[in-house]
């Protein structure tokens, strides 16, 4: 059974069921990861040694606050990307590196000023039977040293009805052994695994398939940990489904899947002016982790992807400039086969995290902080501009031709580097002047952006 199909239920419709929910543990949801640098980058399926190098050479200097890495657990063998999401034990013994490589990565990233979020697969164990990447022999419902048959839900069939809460959270996601997270011993084993990752220096977790565990169970696992750190739950929104993202907002942040879909509709539909109300109909900004795409959505077509070129970069510029939510930049690899695993060498990675349009906006977001959205302008369709108080200003042109406009900003007068096009350290030919009255005359190229902030003034 192939894990690539795990999103099928995310689009099914039905009647919303909210009855039977109990009160969650009163943790404070973190609107952004704690600290002054709030942008996360997901380095999907990157070997841990390569992530360490990226922290030193790219992520730290660019100002990323967090890097999210793919699951640190022994998993089934195979070249496909989804093998990483079928654990057979909680040892760090997967294709991305062993425990020493993982711990060294965390230490190196911390030295570069970048904290680490681990993708945690705790809803299920692997399907089938065999020998894991670390040599562990396993059978379905039998994972030596961790879980046995009695630790799994008694529903041993695939989820069929996403309008039925019991079906979604107690039956099997495409044949994967579904842990009974309502049992204290199961919760304790999972919490011990997460505590062990914390002992390597990990700063927090992205909880895979959280939707398929009750919010109470997720909260209980977190409650058993000695210090859970930053926490974000993957809960895919589906209109009319029984399980909704809002249920998990009391535990920590929640991945806001509606956001990427909205950006795709706006940028491909020719009406990015609608993004003025991008927060409408979504999680509160204090709970939402935003992203243009991730490894699931780039494969199921629900969002923009690296294959959309300049438009994709513009969507990332908007995400990093907008005050809504906590942004997560996705950096994966090129693919034509949806099942294909990561490259084995240096070639084939998209390196979106290193694009100037992205790194410049990471610095922009660090500079503007929580400043409010101001000075909104749009042309009713393909171009928008807005400020972040007196700290920053951005214009995005998704049109086919250049945009020449005089913008009103709240910026202090001076000469600024357009950080969407160049680094402040080498900005020749990419500067603009803001008048003492806050106005700026600028030409924004087709499929281009202008981004100014007070930390990138020249002279």
Image: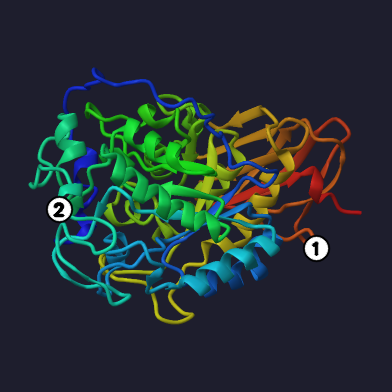
Q: In the picture provided, is 402 more to the left or to the right than 330?
A: right
Residue 381 appears in the picture as rendered: no
Dot in front, 1 or 2: 2
Tally of numbered tags:
2
Checking the image for residue 425, the label placed there is 1
Quadrant location of the N terminus in the rendered image: bottom left
Query: At x 78% / y 32%, what residue is drawn?
Result: 390
How many neighbours does mark 1 have within 10 angstroms: few (below 14), some (14-19), or many (20 or more)?
few
Checking the image for residue 233, the label placed there is none
| 249 or 427, nearer to the observer | 249
Residue 358 % position (x, y): 59, 55
Query: At x 51% / y 74%, what residue is drawn?
Result: 101
Q: Quadrant of residue 97?
A: bottom left
Query: At x 63% / y 41%, what residue is drawn?
Result: 34
Residue 281 % position (x, y): 40, 25
| 319 or 163, nearer to the observer | 163
């Amino acid at each position: 059974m192939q894990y690539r199909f795990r999103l099928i239920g995310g689009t099914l419709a039905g009647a919303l069921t909210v009855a039977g929910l109990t009160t969650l543990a009163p943790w404070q949801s973190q609107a952004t990861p704690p600290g002054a640098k709030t942008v996360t980058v997901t380095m999907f399926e990157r070997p841990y040694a390569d992530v360490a190098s990226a922290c030193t050479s790219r992520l730290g200097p660019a100002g990323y606050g967090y890097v999210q890495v793919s699951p640190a657990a022994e998993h089934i063998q195979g070249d496909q990307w989804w093998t990483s999401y079928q654990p057979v034990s909680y040892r760090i013994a997967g294709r991305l590196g062993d425990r020493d490589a993982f711990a060294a990565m965390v230490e190196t990233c911390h030295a570069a000023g970048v904290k680490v979020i681990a993708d945690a697969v705790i809803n299920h164990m692997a399907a089938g039977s065999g020998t894991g990447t670390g040599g562990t022999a396993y059978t379905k419902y039998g994972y030596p040293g961790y879980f046995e048959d009695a630790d799994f839900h008694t529903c041993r069939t695939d989820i069929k009805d996403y309008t039925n809460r019991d079906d979604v959270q107690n039956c099997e996601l495409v044949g994967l052994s579904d842990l009974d997270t309502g049992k204290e011993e199961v919760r304790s084993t999972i919490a011990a695994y997460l505590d062990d990752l914390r002992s390597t220096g990990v700063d927090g977790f992205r909880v895979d398939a959280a939707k398929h565990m009750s919010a109470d169970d997720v909260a209980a696992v977190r409650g058993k940990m000695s210090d859970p750190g930053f926490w974000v739950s993957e809960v895919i929104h589906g209109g009319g489904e029984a399980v909704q993202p809002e249920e998990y907002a009391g535990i920590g942040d929640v991945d806001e899947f509606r956001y990427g879909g909205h950006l795709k509709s706006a940028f491909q539909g020719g009406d990015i002016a609608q993004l003025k109300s991008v927060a409408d109909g979504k999680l509160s900004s204090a709970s939402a982790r935003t992203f243009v795409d991730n490894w699931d959505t780039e494969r199921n077509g629900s969002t923009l992807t690296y294959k959309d070129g300049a438009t994709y970069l513009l969507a990332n510029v908007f995400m990093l400039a907008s005050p809504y939510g906590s942004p997560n930049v996705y950096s994966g690899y090129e693919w034509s086969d949806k099942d294909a695993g990561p490259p084995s060498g240096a070639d084939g990675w998209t390196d979106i995290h290193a694009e100037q349009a992205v790194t410049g906006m990471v610095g922009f977001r660090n500079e503007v902080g929580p400043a409010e959205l101001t000075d909104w302008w749009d042309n009713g369709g393909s171009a928008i501009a807005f400020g972040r108080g007196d700290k920053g200003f951005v214009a995005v042109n998704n049109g086919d031709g250049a945009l020449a406009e005089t913008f009103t900003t709240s910026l202090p007068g001076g000469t600024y580097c357009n950080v969407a096009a160049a680094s402040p350290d080498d900005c020749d030919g990419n500067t603009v002047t803001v008048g003492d009255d806050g106005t700026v005359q600028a030409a924004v190229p087709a499929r281009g952006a202008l981004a100014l902030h007070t930390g990138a003034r020249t002279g």
